[in-house]
Image (cartoon, rainbow, N blue to C red):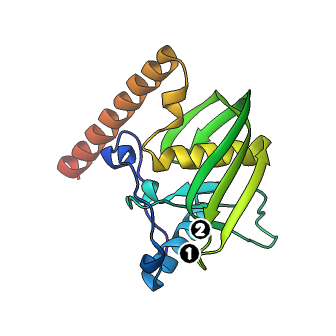
Amino acid sequence: MLLPVLQFPDARLREKAVPIERGQIDDALRKLAADMAETMYDEPGIGLAATQVGVAKRLVVMDLDWTDEGERNPRILLNPEIVRAEGITTSEGEGCLSVPDFKSDVERSARVIVKARTLDWEEVEFDATGLESFCFQHEIDHLDGVLFIDRVSKLKRELYVRRRKKQLRRELEEQSAGSSGG
Ligand SMILES: [Zn+2]
């Protein structure tokens, strides 16, 4: 089932997600993870955090190299945590399914070591660089209520916020014109 992805400035994107305990892994959580993966492929994206679908739990799905024709093996991670970060680099042209019509370079750690749990409560660890590392940082930020626009310059962010507000106002006007004018 496809889930609606919340969009900036929805306040729920700012919630800090809570850790998932072993006893909370049930069919509902498995279904949520499967639905999140389906939604990620549909959008399309390479990562999605539960925060983005209005669930304040520390759950993310990721798949860096899926294709329309190929096999899909979404990584489903509970309680992902950066245990070590090294170096500084630029993530070029980063974007977000929750931040429509905006892309920007973002300063990120060059390498991260991430620990997480699977749905079977297995402990997994990743040593990531490049796109994989940026994706981890971006999704874990979501779980803390942080968006990538928080990591760009104030000027860039303010310009985007202004543009986005204008766009939302226009959509609202079009909706009300449509409903009254038929
Ligand atoms: Zn995002």
Please, what is the three-letter code of the amino acid marked with disc 2?
Ala
Q: Residue 160, how many percent across, how many down? A: 46, 25
The dot on residue 7 is none
89 is higher (above) or lower (below) than 43: above
Say whether residue 5 is visible: no
Q: What residue is drawn where x is 51% and y is 31%? A: 149
Label 2 environment density (alpha carbons within 10 Å; few <14, some 14–19, many ≥20): many
Q: Residue 91, how many percent across, how many down? A: 71, 32
Q: Residue 108, how many percent across, how many down? A: 66, 32
Find numbered disc 1 in the image and state the secondary structure of the residue it sits on: helix
Q: What residue is drawn where x is 55% and y is 24%? A: 152
Provide the residue designation for mark 2.
37
Q: What residue is drawn where x is 41% and y is 52%? A: 6
In depth, the one of 38 and 85 nearer the eye is 85
53 is higher (above) or lower (below) than 155: below
Contact flag, marks 2 and 1 (Cβ < 8 Å)? yes
Please, what is the three-letter code of the amino acid marked with disc 1?
Ala
Label 1 environment density (alpha carbons within 10 Å; few <14, some 14–19, many ≥20): some
In depth, the one of 48 and 140 nearer the eye is 140
